[in-house]
Image (tube, rainbow, N blue to C red):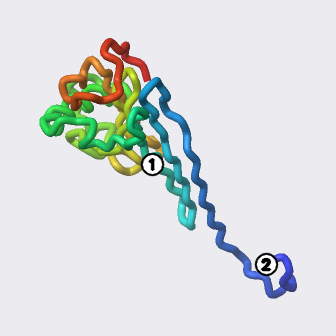
Amino acid sequence: MVASMPADERPSATLNYEEQTSTQVLYQGDNLLSLGFFSYSYSGGAHGMHTTTGASYDLRTGRRLRYNDIFLPAAQAQLPALLAQAVRPLVDLKPGEPLDKALFVKQMPVTRNVFLTAGGVEFIYQPYEIASYAQGEVRVFLPLAQVRPLLRDGLPLPSNAVARR
């Protein structure tokens, strides 16, 4: 539209908007499928915003497994310490250093944005949720051996899994 206007009537600046979405297979096994739903939006300002939402499906039933379907209620009290330990190497923190030296938080919150693999559970934190935009998404993986006592029975996971993403 702007290109068809006479040169002396064209605005000196135009707004550029962008929307993108995609779906990625994050993990696929015999009875488990985990997908990542990626979204990017730019509507002006310094930068656009992107998010990934994880979703796991029990292929035996076709049912989506949400946080409460995956974790026992007692997990909520135990996960912050496990997540804090696992996030440290990702943000170059030594044991004992305060999390807020590299993150926006003093204690790791438990996001419900999770997905399963045969080797464990990955927690996805969006930009600005616990870290700066420049740090991007922070993904924290907890091996199955570490979280198995916190998981509900009957999940489509192998009984003797090796930790792998």
Query: Residue 114's image quarter?
Result: top left
Instruction: Report the residue at 60% width, 60% height from top.
Output: 19
The N terminus sits in image quarter: bottom right
Q: Residue 117, how many percent across, how many down?
A: 40, 27
Instruction: Give amino acid for label 1.
Output: Tyr
Query: Residue 135's image quarter?
Result: top left
Work out how far the residue at label 2 is from the one at label 1, CA to CA, in angstroms.
33 Å
Q: Secondary structure at mark 2?
A: helix
Which residue is tagged 2?
Answer: 2
Q: Residue 49, how many percent across, how many down?
A: 50, 55
Which residue is tagged 1?
Answer: 133
Query: Residue 15's image quarter?
Result: bottom right
Q: Is residue 74 above or below residue 126?
A: above
The answer to whether residue 138 is visible is no
On screen, residue 133 versus residue 44, left or right, reads: left
User: Which circle, 2 or 1, is nearer the viewer?
Assistant: 2
